[in-house]
Image: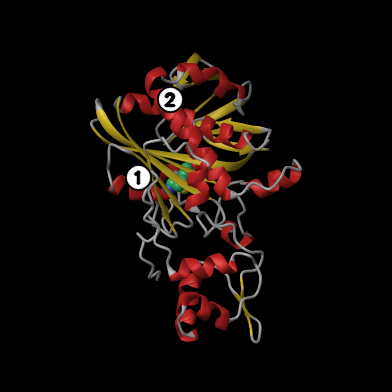
């Protein structure tokens, strides 16, 4: 099991003093991230420790799911290198006046669970390189291998009760699309309530959870997972059609998008939209959301437990409910555990 101290990468951009504690394991990772071979001696010199100690650190890395190649006489290498999340890089791309606390973990159970455990009225952002218990909607697991994707949660306290959640969940999908559009990505679609799709394959998902007063002040945790560069072995357990950003970038001949740039864009768009959403609600996002709706005009099925409703998708309304033209007329459906599929 992983023996890393989960709190070692906690940093904050709220105050001037960044208390980033650079661990030995992280130093090794940063060196190996270039994809070249580094000898045990070089690593030992860097950290000022013995080769046996280095070996122990490398074991920890393997415990994180980092695949090391070791060749006698050459040392250790991370094939293909790693695009690691970096606090300074993310913070430098964010508006420093934002009242935001950023927590960056090498490994965690789930960024959503972390923020649910640490309720706070402040705006907290939690990012992790990997999750051991990443959660998706409808009780699904979210495959979360090390340093390959974005796992990001934002915790936020607001006065609005559960009624606000339906529309919020849709708006967050739109935020992901907006963040990706900054890098020139086109052809993205939204599947109600908030899956981000590309050519009918899932690129990103959103999980929103809430604690507090269902009619008043509550703590909302918004979790976003974006597939960036998923290794084949990690993807074997994914049970739905999926795609990662690397494939889209290759297809569209775009410049490479680093995870730090993407994380910063996502946080920036999310924070901007959250304060606006609190004032405006979903109505002002309805038309934009609809312009990405993957299902408008298509015959769909909505599955809610053992109930299946069929109809032509007419789009979403001003509170984010899905409108279907069924055999008995127009019907609207709201959030929860409903699942939508094209017929
Ligand atoms: C879905 O099923 O589509 C929602 C997936 C949400 C995954 C993200 S990854 C960051 C955050 N932490 C979690 O445990 N889940 C969300």
Residue 328 point in image, percent of width and height: 50, 14
Residue positioned most to the top: 329
Q: Please state, as top left, top right, bottom left or bottom right, where the N terminus lies in the image.
A: bottom left
The front one of 302 and 191 is: 191
In this figure, which colouring scheme has been used for the structure? secondary structure
The front one of 23 and 202 is: 23
Q: Can residue 312 be seen? A: no
Q: Is residue 316 left or right of residue 252?
A: left
Task: Find residue 15 and name its label.
Answer: 1
Q: Please state, as top left, top right, bottom left or bottom right, where the C terminus lies in the image.
A: top right
Residue at left offset 63%, top offset 20%: 297
Q: Earlier in the sequence, mark 2 or mark 1?
A: 1
Tell me: residue 67, above or below residue 173. below
Q: Is residue 23 left or right of residue 41?
A: left
Residue 245 point in image, percent of width and height: 64, 46
* Quadrant hosting residue 310: top right
* Quadrant hosting residue 106: bottom left
Task: Find residue 167 and name its label.
Answer: 2
Q: Is residue 110 left or right of residue 315?
A: left
* Quadrant hosting residue 7: bottom left
Query: From the viewer's perspective, is the residue at label 2 or at label 1 nearer?
Result: 1
The front one of 283 and 104 is: 104
Q: Can residue 120 be seen? A: yes
Pointer 1: residues within 10 angstroms few (<14), some, or many (20+)?
A: few
Task: Find residue 83 and name its label.
Answer: none
Q: Secondary structure at mark 1?
A: loop
Tell me: residue 294, above or below residue 267. above
Q: CB of residue at label 1: within 8 Å of ligand 1?
A: no
Residue at left offset 59%, top offset 26%: 293
Pointer 2: residues within 10 angstroms few (<14), some, or many (20+)?
A: many
Residue 213 point in image, percent of width and height: 23, 31
Instruction: State the separation of the CA atoms marked 2 and 1.
Output: 33 Å
């Amino acid at each position: 099991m992983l023996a890393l101290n989960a709190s070692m990468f906690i940093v904050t951009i709220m105050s001037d003093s960044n208390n980033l504690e650079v661990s030995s394991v992280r130093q090794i990772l940063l060196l190996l991230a270039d994809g070249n071979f580094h000898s045990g001696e070089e690593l030992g010199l860097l950290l000022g420790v013995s080769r046996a100690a280095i070996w122990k650190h490398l074991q920890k890395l393997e415990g994180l799911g980092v695949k090391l190649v070791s060749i006698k006489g050459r040392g250790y290498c991370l094939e293909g290198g790693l695009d690691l999340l970096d606090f300074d890089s993310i913070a430098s791309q964010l508006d420093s006046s934002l009242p935001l606390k950023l927590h960056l973990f090498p490994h965690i159970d789930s960024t959503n669970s972390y923020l649910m455990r640490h309720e706070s009225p402040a705006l907290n952002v939690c990012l992790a390189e990997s999750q051991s218990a990443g959660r998706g909607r409808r009780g699904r697991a979210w495959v979360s291998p090390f340093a390959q994707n974005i796992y990001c949660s934002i915790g936020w306290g607001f006065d609005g009760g559960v009624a606000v959640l339906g529309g919020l969940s849709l708006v967050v999908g739109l935020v992901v699309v907006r963040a990706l559009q900054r890098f020139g990505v086109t052809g993205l679609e939204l599947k109600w309530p908030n899956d981000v799709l590309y050519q009918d394959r899932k690129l990103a998902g959103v999980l929103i959870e809430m604690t507090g007063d269902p009619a008043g002040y509550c703590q909302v945790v918004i979790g976003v997972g974006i597939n960036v560069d998923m290794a084949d072995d990690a993807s074997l357990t994914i049970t739905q059609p999926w795609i990662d950003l690397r494939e889209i970038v290759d297809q569209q001949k775009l410049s490479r998008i680093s995870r730090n740039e993407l994380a910063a864009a996502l946080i920036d768009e999310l924070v901007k939209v959250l304060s606006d959403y609190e004032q405006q609600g979903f109505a002002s996002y309805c038309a934009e959301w609809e312009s990405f709706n993957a299902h408008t005009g298509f015959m769909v099925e909505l599955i809610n437990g053992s109930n299946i409703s069929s109809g032509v998708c007419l789009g979403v309304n001003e509170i984010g409910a899905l409108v279907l033209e069924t055999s008995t007329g127009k019907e609207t459906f709201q959030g929860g555990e409903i699942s939508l599929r094209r017929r």
